[in-house]
């Protein structure tokens, strides 16, 4: 029997060796924001109570099983019950539950009541199959799949979805909230430290739910302002005849119906909202054949860290592969299924694809800025 | 009375002769015997258990390492949808139904259920409904919208093709089977208890069946309504859940979980009933706190109606709703805790025999406790925002439904197998199955807790290699295959034990309830003489009446013996004859459901079968005149 117990202990230790590491990019233990911090502490509070109950019950089961193994044919004492004991183990769990309920209810109201909108940064996050759109209505800035936030600032994320259910989740900063079509949810978040954080869709949303991810870049206040300025600065002018310029022509001809690339312009913000809405209507009305779909805004794409909604590092090789055949990286994208360049008669040559990739990577603000992108 | 002429029978012309034999294939196809029906429930749902298990293994293979390309995302979505749907509706529910069928009449001293033909109808509707749902694999893709079928992703607008229509039509059909069975067991338990068996003298398993049946009758119609709405949306272009036309996808979540949470207790209460029978038997003392176990079960069943929105803590219902559902959810832990402490107290001071059934039952308490505790952490809704839709919840409900329900079902199989079939399952192989399953189960599902806490969402078909999820996933996959070996060892056990029959007496475990007072396997009429009941665990006290005088050191030579079938005059016992109408109605319903997706011709044929079956059924005499029946 001892060897069985020993094996059991080793087995349990092995399992715990696999346990939670705060370093992993989506760990809910390595928190960098007060909301996630509160949620973590509340979890740990419940967890340690549960551990005590766990030890009592599991220890009790093992103890009783060994202690009262059948030794002889004698009939044990035939107890039917004990009212005092019953009352005791009804009341004690009830008390434990109350002890857990009090901080829980306080935390619900602490995290789910929004701060004053005037003193907060408002971000609108919209879920699309299978990417995230981020809009800053007061700053009139729009971007996709990469959310930029200033540190130590109250942020109200206004969350909705264009198509199916999604869920907005940055594990290290705050717990998730669902993105529901025709409905706006509000999530309060605050990031403590500058850095790069991972986000991921957490509600099943169709074929490539697994590849609907995003990044959060938290800046110092100063860098954040620089980023906003960048987003309003046009990109460098391209030398005519260069690969990049050829790429630009190809992009404008083949891609720009769905991908906006110039939201740095004045008034581009409202235009983009209308454009995105019209693309959606177009697709909605003819899901089989529409050549137009809602697509991520690519303004200053050259500064993006990832492509394909947080899937691959944004570099030349990956970008060429992505444009050649998105299915190879992310099976089931709307781009592959609807864009005319993937129909036989309109296919682009390898050279043309390379030119588009070069153009997209050249999309960076023309002036140097201090905004770091945590590449 | 010799001069009375036979009353004229109104009836349909018979297309087939009524099956009359108690042997051979037709005796199974036309059976109305609760024992045969129970066996068929068991065989069919065990088949789906294997299928659901294979689906799970494929999922585990794909997730065994980062960025695996073994299964494409579309197939992966179909696999997890069908794994969940299969395990809930085609495995745990009907496996429980197998035990209801086998045990309830035996435990209450009845010769059958109240409505034997309705019982056969439940079986056949379940069988053909389960086949209907799985036909989808061969007709262009299985359901792929999750076992919860959340719109808009499950609407025709976002999910064209027939997969989700098969899913919802399958659920519609299966709901009929469950509701009919639920009604049947409620009526059976209320009306057919042996003389003297008041409600508070009923075996705990029968009690849990009673509560479960009430839940089924109340909860499944809710799913039925949701299912009809979704069917109308998908097939007839209505807009209940179509967000593009202003329909409300959250409405679906409310009705689905209003069904879905009581459903959780439909899955676990029978398991609690099973272990509540096994623990006292192998501790050789009564169940501690019988009435507390019963009332906490009823309490769980009742409170289960007020917690559905805890499945929706991150939907954005607002702080008031979240507060209410947090509190109601937490308080379900209290009756659950009461049960666990009573089971422990049953062990306390006992004389414990560690049979396989007992090991699985103790394993049930141990694993279910873990699931219960992680359930409390889920009830804490602010921190649940981190765990919702991650692998943490996958771990939680597998501890409840596998470590709970499936462990208890295995316990029940080892415990009642000798009663049902007259021979023992091998204890040696059984213990191997238990150890393998215990190790495999924990290796598969314990690491999922930290996968969830490390931010791995569920329902993703792949993940990047820098997320720190690989080791735990690999462990889970190894665990999954260990469970597969454990299940295989159980199947080997069944075959081995069938070939090398170690015959079982009527009362092999020194049992406590009425089913042990008759021979193994029970004769088709169960009880030659309907017993009279005066105590909880009546059979136990018939054997050891001196215990009633309060003497723990009472006389331990049994004073009662298993009923001797050789002296029974079977012609005195009247049981209904066989009927094939339930089978036809079962086939007809599924055909009609299939036709909804393809052609009205099929719907018509199906409905004709249903109509013909119903008329034939209602005009068919219980016993065929002029036959020697018993």
Image (cartoon, coloured by chain):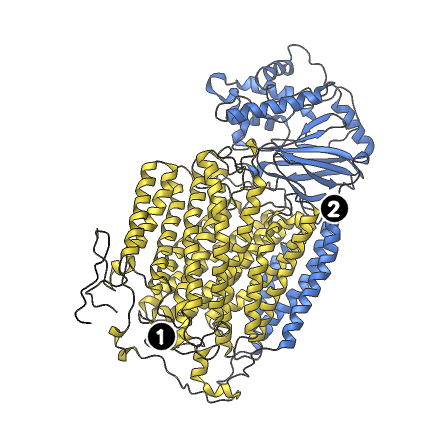
Q: Are marks 1 and 2 on the same chain?
A: no
Residue at left offset 61%, top offset 42% = A202
Residue at left offset 63%, top offset 27% = A296
Placement of the N terminus of chain B among the 4 image quadrants:
bottom left
A73 in relation to A349, above or below = below
Q: Is residue A63 left or right of residue B415?
A: right
The quarter holding residue A141 reads: top right
Placement of the C terminus of chain B among the 4 image quadrants:
bottom left
Q: What x and y, as percent, mark residue A147?
A: 70, 33
Residue identified by numbered label 2: A111
Residues A226 and A128: in front is: A128
Q: What x and y, as percent, mark residue B120?
A: 34, 58
The quarter holding residue B540 reads: bottom left
- The secondary structure type at the circle numbered 1 is loop
Residue at left offset 52%, top offset 83% = A71
Residue at left offset 26%, top offset 74% = B572
Q: Chain of mark 2?
A: A
Res A138 seen here: yes
Q: Chain of mark 1?
A: B
Q: Colour of chain A?
A: blue
Q: What x and y, as percent, mark residue B488?
A: 41, 59
Q: Nearer the viewer, mark 1 or mark 2?
A: 2
Verify CB contact (< 8 Å) between mark 1 and mark 2: no
Within 10 Å of disc 1 (Cα), the crowding (few <14, some 14-19, many 20+) is: many
- The secondary structure type at the circle numbered 2 is helix
Residues A254 and A189: in front is: A189
Q: What x and y, as percent, mark residue B383?
A: 69, 51
Q: Colour of chain B?
A: yellow
Q: Which mark is residue A318?
A: none
Q: Which mark is residue B504?
A: 1
Distance in Å between CA atoms under marks 1 and 2: 62 Å
């Amino acid at each position: 029997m001892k060897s069985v117990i020993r094996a059991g202990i080793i087995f349990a230790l092995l399992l715990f060796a696999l346990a939670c590491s705060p370093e992993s990019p989506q760990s809910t233990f390595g928190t960098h924001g007060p909301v996630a911090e509160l949620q973590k502490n509340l979890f740990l509070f419940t967890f340690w109570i549960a551990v005590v109950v766990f030890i009592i019950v599991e220890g009790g089961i093992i103890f009783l099983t060994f202690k009262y193994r059948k030794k002889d044919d004698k009939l044990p004492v035939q107890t039917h019950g004990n009212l005092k004991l019953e009352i005791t183990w009804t009341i004690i769990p009830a008390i434990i539950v109350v002890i857990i309920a009090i901080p829980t209810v306080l935390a619900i109201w602490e995290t789910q009541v929004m701060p004053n909108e005037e003193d907060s940064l408002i971000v609108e996050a919209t879920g699309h199959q299978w990417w995230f759109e981020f809009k800053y209505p007061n700053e009139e800035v729009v971007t996709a799949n990469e959310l930029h936030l200033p540190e130590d600032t109250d942020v109200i994320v206004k969350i909705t979805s264009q198509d199916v259910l999604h869920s907005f989740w940055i594990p290290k900063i705050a717990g998730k909230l669902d993105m529901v079509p025709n409905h706006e949810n509000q999530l309060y978040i605050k990031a403590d430290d500058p850095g790069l954080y991972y986000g991921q869709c957490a509600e099943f949303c169709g074929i490539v739910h697994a590849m609907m991810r995003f990044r959060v870049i938290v800046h110092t206040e100063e860098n954040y302002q620089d980023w906003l300025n960048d987003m309003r600065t046009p990109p460098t002018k391209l030398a005519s005849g260069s690969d990049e310029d050829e790429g630009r022509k190809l992009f404008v001809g083949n891609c720009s119906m769905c991908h906006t690339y110039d939201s740095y312009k004045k008034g581009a913000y409202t235009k983009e909202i209308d454009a995105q809405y019209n693309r959606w209507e177009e697709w909605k009305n003819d899901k089989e054949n529409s050549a137009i779909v809602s697509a991520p805004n690519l303004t200053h794409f050259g500064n993006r860290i990832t492509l394909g909604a947080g899937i691959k590092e944004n570099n030349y090789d990956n970008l060429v592969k992505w444009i050649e055949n998105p299915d190879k990286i992310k099976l089931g994208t709307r781009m592959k299924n609807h864009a005319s360049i993937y129909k036989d008669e309109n296919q682009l040559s390898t050279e043309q694809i390379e030119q588009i990739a070069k153009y997209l990577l050249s999309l960076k603000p023309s002036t140097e800025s201090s905004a770091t992108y945590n590449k | 009375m010799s001069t009375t002429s036979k009353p004229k029978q109104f009836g349909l012309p018979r297309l087939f002769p009524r099956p009359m034999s108690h042997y051979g294939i037709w005796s199974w196809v036309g059976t109305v015997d609760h024992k045969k029906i129970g066996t068929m429930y068991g065989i069919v749902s065990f088949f789906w258990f294997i299928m659901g298990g294979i689906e799970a293994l494929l999922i585990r293979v794909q997730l065994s390492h980062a960025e695996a390309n073994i299964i494409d995302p579309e197939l992966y979505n179909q696999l997890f949808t069908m794994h969940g749907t299969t395990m809930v509706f085609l495995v745990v529910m009907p496996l429980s139904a197998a035990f209801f069928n086998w045990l309830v009449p035996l435990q209450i001293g009845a010769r059958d259920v109240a409505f034997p033909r309705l019982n056969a109808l439940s079986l056949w509707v379940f069988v053909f409904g389960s086949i209907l749902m799985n036909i989808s694999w061969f007709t262009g893709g299985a359901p792929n919208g999750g076992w919860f079928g959340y719109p808009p992703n499950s609407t025709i607008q976002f999910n064209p093709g027939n997969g989700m229509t098969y899913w919802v039509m399958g659920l519609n059909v299966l709901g009929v089977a469950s509701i009919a069975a639920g009604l049947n067991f409620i009526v059976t338990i209320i009306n057919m208890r042996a003389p003297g068996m008041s409600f508070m003298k009923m075996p705990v398993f029968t009690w849990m069946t009673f509560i479960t049946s009430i839940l089924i009758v109340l909860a499944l119609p809710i799913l039925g309504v949701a299912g009809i709405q979704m069917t109308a949306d998908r097939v007839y272009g209505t807009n209940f859940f179509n967000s593009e036309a202003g329909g409300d996808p959250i409405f679906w979540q409310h009705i689905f979980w209003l069904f879905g949470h009581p459903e959780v207790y439909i899955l676990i209460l029978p398991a609690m009933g099973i272990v509540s029978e096994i623990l006292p038997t192998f501790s050789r003392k009564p169940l501690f706190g019988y009435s507390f176990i019963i009332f906490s079960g009823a309490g769980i069943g009742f409170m289960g109606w007020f917690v559905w929105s805890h499945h929706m803590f991150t939907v954005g219902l607002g702080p008031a709703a979240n507060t209410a559902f947090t509190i109601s959810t937490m308080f379900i832990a209290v009756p659950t805790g009461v049960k666990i402490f009573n089971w422990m107290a049953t062990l306390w001071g006992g004389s414990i025999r560690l049979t396989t059934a007992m090991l699985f039952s103790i394993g049930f308490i141990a694993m279910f406790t873990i699931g219960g505790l992680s359930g409390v952490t889920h009830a804490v809704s602010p921190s649940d925002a981190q765990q919702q839709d991650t692998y943490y919840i996958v771990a939680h409900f597998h501890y409840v439904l596998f470590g709970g329900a499936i462990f208890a079902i295995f316990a029940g199989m080892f415990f009642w197998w000798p009663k049902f079939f007259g021979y023992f399952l091998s204890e040696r192989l059984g213990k191997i199955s238990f150890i393998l399953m215990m190790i495999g189960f924990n290796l598969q599902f314990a690491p999922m807790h930290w996968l969830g806490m490390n931010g791995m969402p569920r329902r993703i078909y792949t993940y990047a290699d820098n997320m720190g999820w690989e080791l735990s996933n690999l462990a889970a996959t190894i665990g999954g295959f260990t469970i597969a070996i454990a299940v295989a060892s159980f199947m080997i056990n069944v075959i081995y034990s069938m070939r090398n029959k170690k015959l079982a007496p009527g009362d092999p475990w020194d049992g406590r309830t009425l089913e042990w007072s008759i021979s193994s396997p029970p004769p088709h009429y169960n009880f030659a003489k309907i017993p009279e009941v005066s105590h909880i665990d009546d059979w136990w006290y018939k054997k050891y009446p001196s215990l009633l005088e309060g003497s723990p050191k009472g006389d331990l030579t049994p004073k009662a013996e298993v009923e001797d079938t050789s002296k029974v005059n079977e012609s005195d016992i009247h049981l209904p004859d066989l009927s094939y109408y339930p089978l036809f109605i079962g086939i007809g319903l599924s055909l009609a459901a299939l036709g909804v997706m393809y052609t009205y011709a099929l719907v018509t044929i199906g409905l004709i079968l249903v109509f013909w079956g119903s008329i034939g059924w209602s005009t068919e005499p219980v016993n065929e005149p002029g036959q020697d029946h018993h």
